Each structure stands twice: as C-alpha cells, then as structure tokens.
Image (cartoon, grey):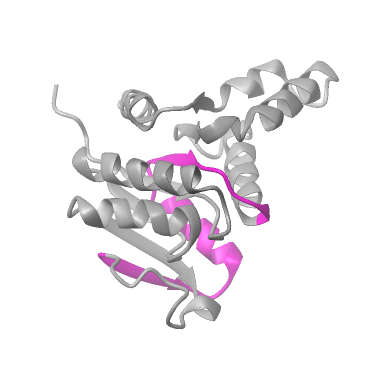
Amino acid sequence: MQRRKMNICLFGGSGNNVDRAYIEAGEALGRAIARRGHTLVFGGGAGGLMGAAARGVREEAGKSIGIIPEMFKGDGVRFKDCTEFVYAETIGERKKLMTERSDAFVITPGGLGTYDELFEVLTLKHLGLLDKPIAFLNTKCYFNQLEAAMAHTADCGFMSGNDLQLYRMFDQADILLDYLEQAGQK
C-alpha cells in the first residue's frame, strides 16, 4: 500500500539553550518526515526544536511550511529556507492556520508556547472538533511527568480515562511516524 503524503505539524520549543540530545532528536524527526515524503508544518522559527526539525527536512530536500506571526518576521527569528511561508496577524491565527493546514500533530519538548499548542489540539480533539492523530516525541522522557499528571487528572475525575487515548507517546521518530501514517489512513 502506498503511503499517503501528509502535512505533519510540529509543536516544539524555540529556545537553543537545551540539551543537545533534544536538538538531535528534532533534526532526526525532520529527516524522517522528509524521507517519507511528508511536509513539515511548523511555527517558522529558526531556533530550538522547530529549527532543528526544519533543518532535518532541508537536509533531505523535503518540504516545509513555516507559519509565523508578523511580529516575528525579522531576520534571525524565522527559518529562512522554508518551502512556503504563511504570515499570521496573531498567535491565535497562527495556531488556527497550523491546525487547518495539518493532517497530524507531533509534540516535541518545549515550553509555554508548546504547552499552549498541545492543549489546544487535545481540547479540540476531546470536543470532537478535530479528528487528526496526535503523538508526542518523548525524548529523554521529557513528557513522563506530563503523562503522569494527565493520568492523575483522569483518576481525580476531571477528565475521562478515554481522554488518555487522544494521543500516543513515542521515544523513536520512525515508530511515531508509523503511528501517524496508520492513524491518518482511517
């Protein structure tokens, strides 16, 4: 069976002051996305895991769509080698465009912006307003405490145990992409 080409959205950190293992995992993910013929949709940043994934895609001559707010349009902030740039007026419009332009979501380690993006897509999926696969790349067990907090939230009755099935956790890019491709065929 031929694999359907997907637009895979990456939510991940933009900072560079992180353990090199995170950057290497982001680059490897980008290379794997490109090798499989998929397009990376991301926040358009040059730094952190966003930039790492975009560099990986570029190394494999893949396609990338950078969706970036106008306020970050300046040189040095955006990844200049995107196949396509889309400029949004606000952060909210950026998230909306990223969600609309994507077939699946990958969450990599990051900070407040990443958490904002991931909880938005999880909430949309919970409400039935989004039917796209969501996967975490759990590099260096980064999301273990989040996963424990989600289970605790369900145990306390603040969300359904079924909500824990809205996403999957992986520690290897290729297995994560296998999941997205299979889930995206449904």
Q: Which residues are magenta?
A: 83-112
Quadrant into which the C terminus falls: top left
User: Height in image: 90 above or below 156?
Assistant: below
Q: Which residue shows up at 76% across the image and 25% down it? A: 159
Quarter where residue 153 is shown: top right
Question: Against 92, is 130 above or below?
Answer: above
Q: Is residue 93 magenta?
A: yes
Pick the residue in front: 99 or 31. 31
Residue 58, position in %: x, y? 24, 57
Q: Residue furthest right?
A: 156
Q: How far across and how far down the image is residue 85, in percent?
A: 34, 70
Q: Residue at x 33, y 51 (%)?
A: 40
Tally of numbered tags: 0
| Residue 36 image point, x, y percent | 21, 37
Q: Residue at x 47, y 74 (%)?
A: 77
- The x and y percentages for residue 91 are 59, 66
Q: Is residue 114 left or right of residue 171?
A: right
Residue 46 belongs to magenta span = no
Q: Residue furthest left?
A: 2
Q: Where the N terminus falls, by quadrant?
A: top left
Residue drawn at 42 percent across, 65 percent down: 44
